[in-house]
Image (tube, rainbow, N blue to C red):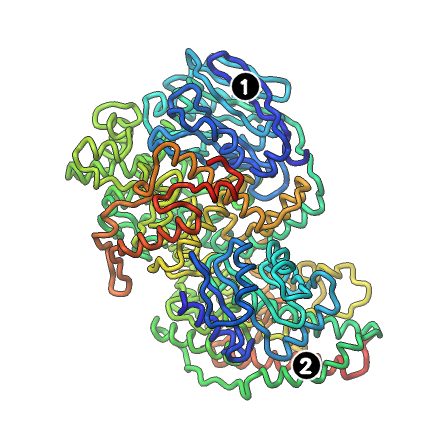
Amino acid sequence: MLKLLNKYEDKLVAHGLCSPGEPLVGGVNDAVIWNRPDPLAEELEKIVAALNINSIIFARPTEPFFSILNYHCRSSDAEFVPEDTETRTFLHSIPVAHSMTAAEIVSLLQRRKGCVVEGHGVITFGTVSPEQAFVVFSSIIFSAFVKFFVDYAYALHSGAPEAAAASMLPDVLAAYDKFLPAGVNADLETGVFAGEDDILRAMAHAGKATVDARMVDSFFGNISYFARDTVYISQTGSSLDELDGCIDACPLDNSASTGITASSELVAHRDIYLEGGIRAILHGHPKFSVIMSMLCFEPACENRGRCHIKCDRERFVEDIPVIPGEVGTGPRGLSNTLPPAMLGRRGAIVYGHGVFTVGKKDFRDAFANLSEIETLCRETYMRIINGPVQR
Amino acid sequence: MHGWTGKILTVNLTKQTTEELTLPAEVYWRNIGGKGLCGALLFDHFRHAWDDPRMPLAFMTGPLNNTSSPTSGRMTVMSRSPLTGAVCDASVGGRLGTVLKCAGYDGILVTGRSHSWCGLTINENGVAFQNAASLAGLAVSDIHARLSAAPGMQSGAHAMVGPAAENGVRYAAIVFDGHYFAGRGGLGLVMAEKKLKFLSVSGSLKTEVFDRNELKAAQEEIFRLVAASPVLTGDLGLTNYGTGALYDLMRSRRMMPTNNFRETYFEPALSMNAYAYKKRYDTKKFGCAGCHVLCKKVGAQGEVIPEFETMSHFSALVGNSDLDAVVAANRVCNEAGMDTISAGVAIATYLEITGRQMTPEALVVLLESIASGRGDGALLGQGALRFARESGRPEVAMVSKGLEFPAYDPRGAYGMALAYATSTRGGCHLRAYPVAHEILRKPVATNRFSLSGKARIIKISEDMNAVVDSLTACKFLFFAASLEEYARALQGVTGMQTSAQELLKAGERIYYRERIMNARNGFTAEDDDIPARFFQESGSSSESIRIAPISRSEFLQERAAYYRIRGLDAQGLPTPEKCQELALPC
């Protein structure tokens, strides 16, 4: 158990979400154990005792995330509701506690998977593994970040930018620069790959490079390669930086269902490959791409509020299409919207969700495309907030 | 009340009388419905033997039945098992749960024993006893056809017992709407003992919903999660391939019970997977009322395609590599109304003890003899454990508390070892279903070859599934959704202010009550165990996957942790302190 707790402490730090020595990770079987002693453990154990859970994480996130979370706390009463896919699908809302007391926090965690404690940090839990607590922790930070920038741009557009947000923006952007790695070049294998070992190795390297470049939090996103009439794809909920043993081989004719554990985007990947000419697909959640996908200044659009499923406009960030589509295979699923949008394109952004990019031989161009699209989106966003206000 | 009708039909078969039972709202709120309500109503009766006329047979719906909440068509049946002597409940699909609400009842509580075969027709205008003598000896499909042809019953729903129950098979099932089984533990034999051949229900009443917008919002959240689930609606998932989608996975993970759990890999399984059935039988999908996953499969010629457990046990477990024989064996069980899991394990036990090999033809013949109570089948119909004991080889029966194991070898998913052992109804995969995280990676992946920390996970999962069976929703949906979304649905339907964690507390109470009922009937830690084979023998390893025996000491250590977490003493018995905390009599 302790090994598992230490693993997620290390991941929070390695992903830049927390400072070293900061995360407090608890595991519960017939007793609670912690990754390290901490005076807060006593209060947290009251929370554990009141809930049917098996793990808990409390940590103060790094900047700019901590400031952004506190901003949302100050702007909210009981909860805030980002509109990205992570929130819409899994979190639903992010509750806010205003004191670091079990009495207040328990009632929030009875109905949601995590909460923000104003001025203190984030608390999340799992019922099966600390991995759930880690995923929710990461999601809350991602969603809060996206909401901050989306809200700011819309407020600016409406002529009423929030003063507090405007004043903290330079520091937030500077801190975010520090959060990002110095360079995003990755020395990835050159394809075409034919042997299974080569494919798995190339996928593992590309997945890790994507996480290291902070273009996805490790438990999100997915990656695939097409060879021998088979789609090799990361498993559902797998970490892109830990793909060893977590790649399913899914034959095109569905003659084996072993890939039932494959990513929920298997169908979308497969249909892109079926159009021909593509060998590699990479899907990440780079933050400014997601932010840009959620910015649309179309006046009085009848689909406002349902953009993630109803948007019928042709939207682009330069040459990159922005499309609606929910996770998976449902009638509004991106398995329907993504493949046609990718035809002849280097990538596409799914509203509120993330970016899909392709490679003709290997992951070098897919990775480069992902990085370039994120840079493009960030530059475009900065032009929007610094340039003449769009009306 | 919203959600519930507030009425339970009580039936005394001895006197051929019925009454309407009205329970305080608090009973509904504490027990939700389905499994919870069954437990509350049967609690004081559990000292009676399964065949005592005073022992009730309960059919209970949940507050979500007959609403637009996803997978709201299920219900729970509960009594005491003729096979195990333990608590036995089954969550069953089909339409009867929905239609019973339409007839104005939350459930039916049956006691007594009719002097001859009878049936019960129920609709919003009344209840009537029927002479069912003419249905005795008929196959399930024939009974269903006759019941459906009765005036006013074309759109009704039906539950019935078949020949296996008439002939004393201890794992006889109750069959709902021709296709859906309250399969495990012999609930069909309980119904047959009461000489109740069928229930036929029709109705058109609406279920009152407290807040339709709230329910709609919850429904959208659940649909969104289901659409995002590869296991449910992915191209290789349950919608496309049915539960048979798991077959390849069990083979590839080398945990497919083979030759009575002596091996864990079956080479012919490669060509007996869900894809093979789809190709051979050109399958179409159908499913329960209120469900859009539609995990049931039927062939173009009407062949009923076996579920995963049946596919596995009638192939790997008994050494059969003939696809058609699996379908034929399934048909025999369906028409007789008996549990395929117990039948498969009973036959595998027979094969190990006798040293015989099974031909496809012999498999079908042996199942027919079980269903009719003839020849070797007579004793096999009493279950694997009774057969093995009679043969002087009790260790060969792959059971827990006398209930035969389904198609997950615990050496390939260690949480399953603990889950089989602690399950209140015996060797059952559905109480905690650790395969979800150990194999299917939902909600996240755990180490399948470790017992560390599994005690608490199993306990939480048992509590959660107790809630799911009380709601009454489908466990499969919880590969995607969680109690967070279903709490909102429940709130929308009933107006009950609740949360995921509060529901888990209700689940804990519901499950602990079953521990009390079993303890009162003599079940102790000795029964919370699995066969020695799993601690002593390896499975079928490959170069990359080692299927080793489970460490007995680690198992006992984790079981002891489970007892502490569950609030049981070292013997697995309820404690006064925990009973008091949960407001349950000890």
User: Mark 2 highlights which residue?
Assistant: A172
Residue B389 to residue B499: above or below: above
How many numbered circles are shown? 2
Label 2: chain letter: A
User: Furthest-front residue in view?
Assistant: B577
Disc 2 on helix, strand or loop? helix
Q: Which mark is residue B121?
A: 1
* A1 displayed left or right of A72: left
Front residue of B416/B290: it is: B416
Front residue of B210/B137: it is: B210
Residue A77 to residue B502: above or below: below
Residues packed near mark 2 inside 10 Å, few (<14), some (14 to 19) or many (20 plus) = many
Label 1: chain letter: B
User: Furthest-left residue in view?
Assistant: B355
Whole-percent x, y for residue B233 in the image: 51, 52
* B290 displayed left or right of A279: right
What residue is shown at x 27% (from left), y 46% (from top)?
A: B316
Report if residue B436 is visible in the image: yes
Residue type, label 2: Val
Q: Nearer the viewer, mark 2 or mark 1?
A: 2
